[in-house]
Image (cartoon, rainbow, N blue to C red):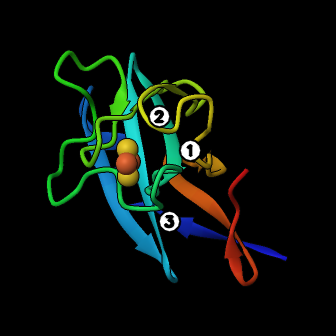
Amino acid sequence: MFYKHLIPNAQRLSEGKALHFKVNQSEFVIIKQKGELRAYENRCPHQKRALNCYTEEIFDEDGDYIKCHHHGALFSPNDGQCIAGPCQGKNLKKATLGVEKGDFYILIGEGSPAVA
Ligand code: FES
């Protein structure tokens, strides 16, 4: 059983920015890059800590990669794969993001977030 968790203001997210939010006990981040929105669980595969580390910034200095601000791991915004850093080759957990009548939502499974 899944339910939709509405993400207010996702459609107004600016290019290169991120929205952070919490659903149940899990933190998520929605990013916008090259006009595409993607959602990931906000948890680095290296030490299972939040990527942003007390900052709202989620991208690296050039805006090309998602960056974990703890030890500098870089992740592809397209698929969440770590391309450099201490967890190279591992992936961020992607959340299922949908849109209905202009409103964005993520799908949450009963008892746990719908992440792949
Ligand atoms: S916790 Fe993310 S790189 Fe170490």
Q: Residue at x 61, y 49 (%)?
A: 93
Tag on residue 115?
none
Would you call the spot at circle 1 few (<14 residues within 10 Å), some (14-19), or many (20 or more)?
many
Q: Is residue 29 above or below residue 25?
A: above
Residue 81: quarter of image = top right
Determine the secondary structure under disc 1: loop
Q: Position of residue 38 (x, y in %)?
A: 51, 37
Q: Residue at x 34, y 51 (%)?
A: 51
Tag on residue 37?
2
Q: Amino acid at mark 3?
A: Leu
Determine the secondary structure under disc 3: strand
Q: Residue at x 14, y 53 (%)?
A: 55
Whether label 3 lies within 8 Å of ligand 1 gets the answer: no
Give the CA separation, mark 2 to mark 3: 14 Å
The mark lying in front, picked from 1 and 2, is: 1
Q: Is residue 58 above or below residue 34?
A: below
Return the residue at label 3: 6
Q: Position of residue 9 (x, y in %)?
A: 32, 53
